[in-house]
Image (cartoon, rainbow, N blue to C red):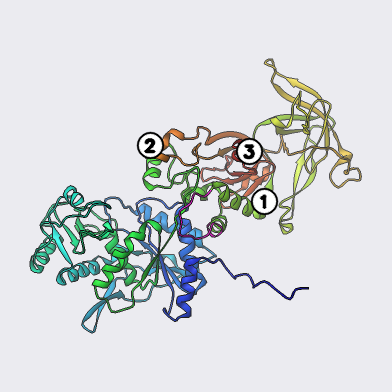
Amino acid sequence: MSDFSPPPAPAGPTDFIRDIVASDRTAGKHARIVTRFPPEPNGYLHIGHAKSICLNFGIAHENGGQCNLRMDDTNPTKEEVQYVEAIQTDVRWLIEGWADDALGMKPKGAQPTTTTINGLTDIHLAAAPALIPNADAVEPFFASDYFDALYLCAERLIERGHAYVCDLSPADTERLRGSPDRPGEDSPFRSRSVSENLALFREMRAGKHPDSSRTLRARIDMTSPNVWLRDPILYRIRHAEHHHTGNAWCIYPMYDFAHCISDYIEGVTHSICTLEFEVHRPLYDWILTHLELPRPLPHQYEFARLNLTYTVMSKRKLLQLVKEGVVTGWDDPRLPTLSGLRRRGVTARALRDFSTGIGVTKYNALTDVAVLDKAVRDDLNRTALRRFAVLDPVRIVLTNIPEGETIPCNAINNPEDPASGTRVVALTREVWIEQDDFMEVPPPKYFRLRPGGEVRLKYACIIQCQEVVKDASGKVVEIRCVADLSTRTGEANSGKKVKGTIHWVSASEGIEAEVRLYDRLFTEPEPGKDGRDFLTVLNPDSLRCVRARLEPSLGTAVVGQQFQFERLGYFYPDLDSQPGQPVFNRTIALKDAWAKANS
């Protein structure tokens, strides 16, 4: 017998960024780990953001640290309060009960302050970010809260000769920037004196110049192989009202300038971004270094963003789908937005399991949506209550059960969770079954109901088809059967074998409901690939509404409860439900019909 034993499994997820954090902690590099999640409030969060949220909040949670939720709100023409509120809702929902101890929020109205250390001005938060359970007492961090500090930083760069005011038009600025294989050219305004630059920048701040007439640019290197270092724009003029600061400002910092300084102000240790920002990292470091700030500086790390098949995650494309009415709104259950997934019935736990399961890497890849589907099914299989529902009903008359009689049948609520117990469903003279659970001329190996054939009604008894009633057009409208009550579940003869078991709903006790059958929004794995119009591959069957028959217990279902409609899939009560008029969304089918169709 070998005495070799494998090493113990890690306590949590591992990846190259977590390895860096662990190494930094071992080296005593940081007193506390601080990360951040900084979405721009110009749209709703989607499943790609979920990966970033789980990574940033997960690292903070695992290390007893903090992850700041910060609105990157430096573009007043695209950002709205509704997006700020939606982002807060989505983040709290995704991390609730998992990493909410790591959620960094600030006391309402808190502003940064400054101190002087060895002649250098240090900008920091007036108080440590508060972790206050009362949501009314705190709010997210906002980059716009730092506008005063950012402005002082810009003036510092000007004073040190590292920034200048440029009068080039946006078109000329882009033209002189060059390209990856061609160096840029200096702006004719690059040699302005410090005093002139300061005076012009202050005029910009005072609103004396129109939009786009001037910019503040960093003075770096117009021949740099990294085009992001070719005198990038730090500030532009925008005479526009800001959702958070109102009309206090008419110049606004660019993302690259605001982001690194915001990280510094908040004491962020690990600024984790997606790979497209890798080429921005030299500028991130350049700005912080040339400001000569006294504290240890944050460092940026990059990972591959999530790309998922059969959907789009570009905010521009998502906004187009909403504005053109292709979907009903940002929370349409067909969208990959967190609000849409939540409305569809996908749980935060399933999204976290998915985000952790796909890992964190440095290379871009396309993730099959089937991986997400499996995470959703695995989660709901453990937790969803089982119920009966018939989506395409045909009437069964059990001729040997008298009118008005009900036979109680015990049904299991969730076989994966014995603690969920059982419920009683009523077998009555008339019940509904699915249309495709009966065929007059069935193919080979068809084990459901047929003329003369037998099938078991789940949790009830075996029935035998005796007569088929059709309307004038030949459509089957009623199937007359006899119920073998000696085969009731739990009876001595219940062990009688038949090859088919089907679900059913009492016609007299069941309720009617609208059921929305959602499917993938696109028919191709990569909509819009190679520059094609992504709207040309919309799935015409992405939503189908049916009038279904449900067991009566579903009449009191509320948003937040998950159900498996037995043999059909997982379903979730919709916000549109009204008393006596329930609406359910299909979260996901039990099996992947697309895999079979494409195999």
Q: Quadrant of the N terminus?
A: bottom right
> Dividing the picture into quarters, in which one does residue 187 lie?
bottom left
Q: CA distance from mark 1 to mark 3?
A: 27 Å
Mark closer to the chain start, 1 or 3: 1
Task: Name the chief secondary structure element in magenta.
Answer: loop
Residue 564 lies, in percent from the top left, at 65, 47
* SS of the residue under disc 1: strand
Q: Nearer the viewer, residue 17 or 91?
A: 17
Tell me if I can see residue 589 in this picture: yes
Q: Nearer the viewer, mark 1 or mark 3?
A: 3
List the residue tagged with mark 3: 596
Residue pictured at 52% horizontal, 57% vertical? 355
Magenta-tinted stretch: 355-367
Residue 16 lies, in percent from the top left, at 49, 66
List the residue tagged with mark 2: 324
Q: Nearer the viewer, residue 569 or 21?
A: 21
Q: Is residue 264 left or right of residue 341?
A: left
Q: Nearer the viewer, mark 2 or mark 1?
A: 2
List the residue tagged with mark 1: 385
Few, some or many residues within 10 Å of mark 3 (<14, 14–19, 20+): few
* SS of the residue under disc 2: loop
Is disc 2 in contact with disc 1, using a CB cutoff of under 8 Å?
A: no
